[in-house]
Image (cartoon, grey):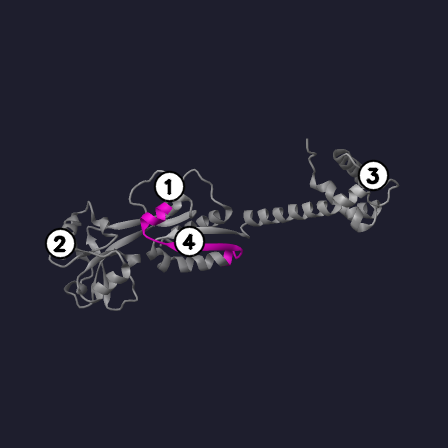
Amino acid sequence: MLPELKIQPLRYVLAIMDEGGFHAAARHLHRTQPALSMAIRELEQRLGEPLFEKGGKATLTPFGSWCAPRFRELVAHHDRVSRDALAMASHQAGRVDIATVPSVASRLMPRLLASFVVAYPGIEISLRDGHSELVNQMVLSGEVELGITSLWQAEEGLDFTPLLHDEIGVICRDDHPLARRDRLHWRELTGHTLIRNGTSRLLEGSPAAGLLEQSRLYISNMISLTAMLEAGIGITTLPRLAFQEEHARLRFLPLAEPRLERRIGLLCRARVSLSPAAAAMRRHLLEHLVAEGV
C-alpha cells in the first residue's frame, strides 16, 4: 500500500535544506522546533526510511538526497495546480466558448465582450456564429458552453433563459412604395414580391402566414438577400437586430399588425454545471441585457 504524502511535511523538508538546519527552518516557518522535528519523524515513518542523518543537522541521507528533488517537484506542481484552480474559480483565468446567431454577434456582442474583457481580463473567449439550429447543436454537443439564439420550440437537454425580444419588420428599398410608411399592416404586403429567408418562419401561425405561400423566392444568405433588396427585386421580413443599418438604401418598417417578435435567449445544457469562466459570462450577459432592457 502506497504511503499517503501530505504537502506540508514536504515543505518542512525543503525548508530545512534551504535554511540550513531545523532551528532556522522552524523560525522561517513560524513553527516550534519540536513540532517540526515531530512532523519529519512522522514522514520518515510513513516512508520507512530516514531522510536526515542523526544528530539534528540538515544532512540528508542517501534516501533523503533521492527524495529531495522529487519533493520539490511535487510541491511546485501542487502550488501551480492550486494557483490555477484558484484563478479559475475567482474568474482570473479560464476559457469560455460561446456561439450566437449572426445578428447578435454583429450588433450586441462587440459591446458586451468589450465590457467583459475589462471585468475579466484573464479569461479567454472563443465566439462562433451560425444559424439558430447550428447554435443549438453546438450547445447540445458540448462544443460550446453557451449559446445566444432564438429557440423555436422547447428542446430536451437545453435550458433557455430569455434575454430580449426582437421586433419583426419589413425591409424594402428607399424608393419602394411601402418605404414612406411608418408602420405596416400585413395586408399591405399583398401583391409585393416577398423574399423569404431563414427567419420567415416567424410569420407561420400568424395572420400574415398566407404571404409565405405566395412567395416564390427564398434566400438564406444575408449578403445575397441584401443584394437582392438593394437591387429592388422585392421586400422581406427580418428581426430588427438582423437589419443591417449600414445599407443606406434600405428601410426597416415595423410590422404593426400582427406585431411579431422573436425571443432571443441564452442556451446552456440542462443539468450540466458551467465552468467558472462560462458562469461569469452568463452572469455578465444577464446583468447587461436584462438590466438594460435591450
Q: Which residue is mark 3?
A: 34
User: Secondary structure beneath disc 4?
Assistant: helix
Give the Cα distance between marks 2 and 3.
92 Å
Give the Cα distance between marks 4 and 3.
57 Å
Which mark is first along the chain, 1 or 2? Answer: 1
Q: Position of residue 4 (x, y in %)?
A: 69, 35
Q: Nearer the viewer, mark 4 or mark 3?
A: 3
Label 2 sits on what residue type? Arg
User: Secondary structure beneath disc 2?
Assistant: helix
Q: Nearer the viewer, mark 4 or mark 1?
A: 1
Q: Nearer the viewer, mark 2 or mark 1?
A: 1
User: Secondary structure beneath disc 1?
Assistant: strand
Q: Contact, CB < 8 Å: mark 4 with mark 3?
A: no
Q: Which residues are magenta?
A: 118-137
Which mark is first along the chain, 2 or 4? Answer: 2
Q: Which residue is mark 4?
A: 288
User: Secondary structure beneath disc 3?
Assistant: helix
Label 3 sits on what residue type? Pro
Q: Position of residue 108 (x, y in %)?
A: 37, 57
Q: Position of residue 38 (x, y in %)?
A: 80, 36
Frontmost residue, 160 versus 102: 102
Q: Which mark is residue 158?
A: 1
**Is residue 163 visible to us here?**
no
Which mark is first along the chain, 1 or 4? Answer: 1
Q: Residues within 10 Å of mark 4 (few under 14, many from 20)?
A: some
